[in-house]
Image: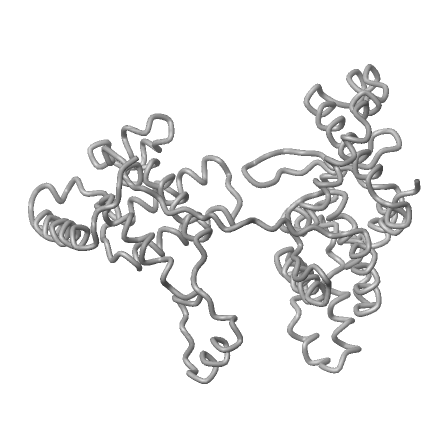
């Protein structure tokens, strides 16, 4: 494992590299330098080829911009391993709002005193470093299939990845897995129904999150075209992060609740959010907010609204703050627990396999259905009956 150089040595190497870049800028070698625009275009071409989600693309360019800003290296293709090490060392010293510092000194002091103004976490810096290492490999001619070719002339591609020569920082902070207890699952539905009576889709969406063990974007963007009705089962066929396809099954009564919310001429399952949130604001103490709600449904806005409402509710819970992602952790935990209690659930899920294969689905879809059924059964075997009934399942 390579070791870090001293701060003085890193500074000297950085100065030498800067001089080299300056000299190359006036010579014929500059024609073969990979510019920042070309480096970025390689990333865009890669994400276009794999049809990546917008948040994945955003995360990559966020890391690239952070590297350019913190190190000052331009073009980024000329970064050395010393620049990469310096990026990590300096990034973990920056405040969380380093890109948009407070203009109001009083507000900054208030945030500092309350403990809200912290430093960038090592986890964030490691996430950026991982994204940067992958980005450099896409521009590295010696990275094999990871290199994205036919975007820039071959002579402009890098010959190595500077991140391969860096001893990365470590994050040994214990990870606390925040999940919802059965009591919290009941309390959350009570809260959403009581605090937002006009937004009837809020508790329904929360129930879908539990059964789907999916991410926020995946449920906010859920479409009716993804619905799969197979015999008496209700599944949704979605493509999530990293283009991973999966089915998830929901109970019949929950499906009926979704049908009651259906908006004609809209492909989205939760399209009723726009009208319901406007109605909520009309009857609230601040009705002027209703005019600020866009008429057409925006999945990202719905997902963000539910994210904040669940976060606000969770602050009063004994286990502390939780976010929408806790539903994913909870659903998967109950799925694991259910598998332990019933090791034969996979066999039980094979309902009319011959009929399914012949008349309904392809081999791949049958496998997806079986996985969906297994997880559905595991969750239903792990939750108390009162929670199951509240979340649309009839024991």
Quarter occupied by residue 228: top right
Residue sitting at 70 percent across and 63 percent down? Answer: 314
From the top left corner, tell me how far across and down residue 81 is, in percent: 25, 43
From the top left corner, tell me how far across and down residue 254 is, in percent: 85, 47
Count all numbered tags in the image, as a single digit: 0
Please state if 73 lies on the left or on the right of 267 as rendered: left
From the top left corner, tell me how far across and down residue 152 is, in percent: 27, 37
Which sits in the foreground, 310 or 281?
Answer: 310
Residue sitting at 51 percent across and 72 percent down? Answer: 115
From the top left corner, tell me how far across and down residue 188 is, in percent: 78, 60
Q: How is the image coloured?
A: one colour
Residue sitting at 34 percent across and 32 percent down? Answer: 147
Tell which residue pokes out farthest to the bottom in this image: 106
Please state if 52 lies on the left or on the right of 386 as rendered: left
Please state if 390 lies on the left or on the right of 110 as rendered: right
The C terminus lies in quadrant: top right
Q: Vertical placement of 381 versus 191: above or below?
A: above
Residue sitting at 30 percent across and 44 percent down? Answer: 39
Q: Vertical placement of 199 versus 101: above or below?
A: above
Which sits in the foreground, 26 or 175?
Answer: 175
Q: Vertical placement of 307 versus 225: above or below?
A: below
């Amino acid at each position: 494992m390579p070791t870090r150089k001293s701060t003085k040595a890193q500074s000297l190497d950085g100065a030498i590299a800067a001089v080299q870049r300056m000299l190359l800028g006036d010579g014929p070698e500059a024609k073969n330098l990979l510019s920042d625009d070309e480096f970025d275009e390689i990333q865009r071409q890669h994400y276009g080829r794999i049809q990546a989600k917008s948040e994945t693309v955003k995360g990559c360019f966020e890391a690239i911009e952070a590297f350019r800003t913190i190190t000052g290296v331009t073009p980024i293709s000329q970064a050395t391993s010393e620049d990469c090490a310096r990026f990590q060392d300096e990034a973990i010293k920056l405040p969380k709002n380093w890109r948009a510092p407070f203009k109001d000194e009083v507000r900054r002091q208030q945030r500092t005193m309350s403990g809200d103004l912290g430093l960038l976490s090592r986890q964030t810096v490691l996430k950026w470093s991982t994204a940067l290492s992958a980005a450099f490999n896409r521009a590295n001619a010696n990275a094999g299939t990871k290199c994205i070719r036919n975007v820039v002339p071959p002579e402009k591609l890098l010959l190595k990845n500077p991140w391969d020569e860096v001893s990365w920082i470590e994050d040994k902070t214990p990870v606390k897995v925040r999940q919802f207890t059965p009591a919290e699952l009941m309390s959350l539905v009570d809260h959403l129904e009581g605090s937002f009576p006009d937004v009837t889709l809020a508790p329904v969406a929360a129930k879908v999150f539990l059964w789907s063990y999916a991410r926020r974007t995946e449920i906010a963007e859920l479409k009716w075209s993804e619905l799969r009705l197979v015999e008496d089962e209700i599944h949704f066929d979605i493509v999530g992060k990293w283009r991973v396809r999966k089915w998830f099954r929901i109970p019949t009564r929950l499906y009926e609740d979704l049908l009651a919310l259906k908006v004609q001429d809209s492909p989205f399952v939760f399209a009723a959010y726009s009208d319901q949130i406007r109605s909520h604001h009309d009857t609230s103490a601040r009705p002027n907010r209703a005019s600020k709600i866009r008429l057409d449904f925006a999945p990202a806005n719905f997902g963000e609204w539910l994210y904040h409402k669940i976060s606000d509710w969770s602050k009063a819970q004994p286990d502390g703050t939780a976010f929408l992602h806790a539903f994913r952790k909870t659903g998967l935990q109950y799925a694991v627990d259910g598998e332990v209690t019933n090791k034969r659930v996979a066999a039980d899920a094979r309902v009319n396999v011959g009929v399914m294969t012949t008349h309904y689905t392809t081999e791949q879809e049958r496998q997806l259905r079986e996985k969906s059924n297994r997880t559905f059964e595991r969750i239903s075997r792990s939750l108390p009956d009162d929670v199951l009934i509240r979340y649309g399942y009839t024991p």
